[in-house]
Amino acid sequence: MHFYTKTSIDTLDYSGEGLNTGSKLVIAAAGESIRTLIQDFEPEILCLMELPMLNSLLLEF
């Protein structure tokens, strides 16, 4: 993990106390792939609230 403090990617950065003074966290990964991700999906079947893992993550915040 890499923390970049007192920086922003755009002016709509709400993680700091002033304009362009927020922080960013970059999580980088290296190595062989663990799984194959899908390349195409049907937008109508993608409903985040119906995915148990994402639903619990959303409720934690």
Image: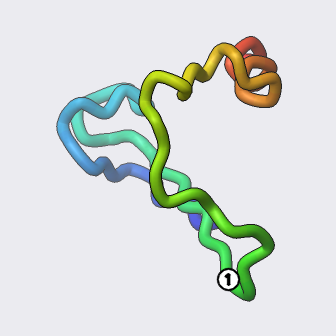
**Residue, x 46% and y 35% (percent of image)?**
42
Picture coordinates of residue 35, whole percent (x, y): 76, 68
Q: Position of residue 16 (x, y in %)?
A: 41, 32
Quick check: 49 left or right of 55? left
Question: What residue is drawn where x is 33% and y is 52%?
Answer: 7
Tally of numbered discs: 1
What amino acid does circle 1 point to? Answer: Ala
Q: Which residue is mark 1?
A: 30
Which picture quadrant has residue 48?
top right
- Assess disc 1: are there few (<14), some (14-19) or many (≥20) residues with their C-alpha within 10 Å of its C-alpha: few
Residue at image point 73% right, 24% down: 51
- Viewport quadrant of the N terminus: bottom right
Task: Give the vertical position of 59 relative to 22 (above or below).
Answer: above
- Quarter holding residue 30: bottom right
- Percent x, y for residue 38? 58, 57
**Height in image: 36 above or below 8?**
below
Badge 1 marks a residue whose secondary structure is loop
On the rendered image, what quadrant is the C terminus found in? Answer: top right
State the scheme by which the image is colored: rainbow
* 34 lies left or right of 3: right
**Residue lying furthest left in this view?**
11
Vertical placement of residue 56 versus 6, above or below = above
Left or right of residue 30, residue 35 in this image: right
Q: Quadrant of residue 50?
A: top right
